[in-house]
Image: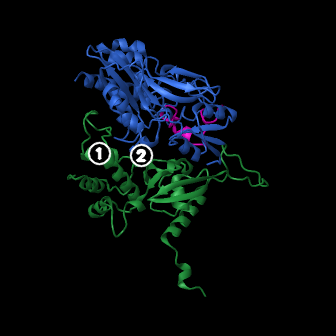
Amino acid sequence: MRSFTYERARTPADAAAAALRNPDTKFIAGGTNLLDLMKLEIETPAHLIDVNGLALDKIEPTSEGGLRIGALVRNTDLAADSRVRRDYGVLSRALLAGASGQLRNKATTAGNLLQRTRCPYFYDTNQPCNKRRPGSGCAAIGGFSRQHAVLGASEACIATHPSDMAVGMRALDATVETVRPDGATRTIPIAEFYRLPGDTPHIETTLQPGELITAVTLPKPVGGRQVYRKVRDRASYAFALVSVAAIVQRDGTGRVALGGVAHKPWRVEAAEAAMPRGAKAVAAQLLADAKPTRENTFKLSLAERTLGAVLTEAKG
Amino acid sequence: MQGPSDFDLSRRKLLLGTAASVAFGAAPPVANAQTPVAPAQAAPQAVPMSKVSFNVNGRPREVTLDTRTTLLDALREHLHLTGSKKGCDHGQCGACTVISGGRRINSCLTLAVMHEGDEIRTIEGLGTPENLHPMQAAFVKHDGYQCGYCTPGQICSAVAVLDEIKAGIPSHVSADLNAPAQLTNAELRERMSGNICRCGAYSNIAEAISEVAGRPA
């Protein structure tokens, strides 16, 4: 690990301003992903701003009837919150499907959104990777790509986003609240928060330099049966090959988002009109632009079948 | 002439020496593209240090550390509490599990300086050889280990798992998110999935935890 200087932030605006002053800065909250990457020298910040003291750890009702989740709410606490369990089951389920008990105790809401891909070529510093070292190439293309993206990938990057929580957040139409270095705040719909890789796969979100996430808000509960189904190589503590977050109403209408298939949670609102007609009809539109590699073509049928299982479960 | 005591290597020193030579042998001959080689004449730079105070197993401790020091390294190398183990050092194996503020965490994936004022409990703080914690006694009784390397992490994790179930925290295998968590074998296995045992003592570990939880496995 490279050495770094360390400070504890006093207010969110101070943290954002301090981050802008030194472009080689990272915010650290749970640290479960950042320190892993720092040990491997994939992340090499010269300065860390510890945001754990910022009192952004509350879950509060909003005036619109939703919930405002502080950026520092730990994954365990968010999954266990009685309002989240009752009204946003897909989010609880997504969180509980990710990582381990130890990691969920430390990992935060904002940190989970911002975690980096687990592409093995991103992790192997001996390999070219446009995400880790822009312009160096992509070793995953033509490499072992069983786990990689089938949707929205580019010639520069076929990595997937690893978060389960973000897939649940996408299905729930969450909004990301931030503060910028000049102290101004803004809200970003989760649909506009993640970027596809294009030719700049190292830029993963629409956050500006120094911008700090302060909260994630959930709109008023939409009810329905909420299911998160994750398919992975072992029963627990593994990243998704494919995951499905679904909210299904009594009349069969609803929402669906996929994880493990793209550089961001994958949702196509237009495909949701087909939900009453079943998984095949939805998948035809949801996966319409898929460009799998020879090794991950299986994700297309796996996604359709997992969606089928989820829709059946939601009816039951 | 050398006396026998000159060869009296402790097991720990021997393991450290072995690990170092293995690591040296496996090191790539040249730095990779991401790691610029430091110029040979470079003046040594001051390493940023930071002071941190926390309470470990009921005892206040204060240490001044290189900011890079993980909580695990602070415990093992600075406070000489070597019960917590370094397995993968990347949060994948759980051997480093300690309880901070009542919650189990991977001490390898957190910086010591981030624990100012925290109450930390390690395996050394759970029980003593003369007075074992019930979970330690149950691991002994049920043979919940083979080599023992993952055991301190398993035991710290298991103690916290039972607290999490009591606190009503659901898991991936809980059938009903809104019902109290059950103490089934499947629940314990899911909740313990962040602790890897390469000897494969899982069924005995589950039996040990079940006994402490008050139900047969």
Find out whether residue A128 is within the magenta segment: yes
- Report x, y in % for residue A245: 37, 26
Question: Residue A261: which disc?
Answer: none
Residue highlighted by disc 1: B166
Question: Residue A102: which disc?
Answer: 2
- Residue A86 in view: yes
Sort mark 1 into few (<14), some (14-19) or many (20+) by Cα contacts within 10 Å. few
Write the start and end of the magenta stretch as one range.
A111-135
Distance between mark 2 and mark 1 Cα atoms: 16 Å
- The chain whose colour is blue is A
**Residue at image point 59% right, 85% down:** B2
Q: Residue furthest right?
A: B41
- Report x, y in % for residue B175: 25, 35
Find out whether residue B143 is within the magenta segment: no
Looking at this view, is A224 or A244 the one in front? A224
Looking at this view, is B57 or A312 the one in front? B57
Q: Quadrant of the N terminus of chain B?
A: bottom right
Assess whether mark 1 and mark 2 are in contact (beta carbons under 8 angstroms): no
- The chain whose colour is green is B
Task: Establish if A6 lies above or below A306.
Answer: below
Q: Nearer the viewer, mark 2 or mark 1?
A: 1
- Report x, y in % for residue B65: 61, 55
Residue B95 falls left or right of residue A280: right
Under mark 1, the amino acid is Lys
- Helix, strand or loop at label 2? It is helix
Under mark 2, the amino acid is Gln
Task: Establish if A222 lies above or below B7.
Answer: above
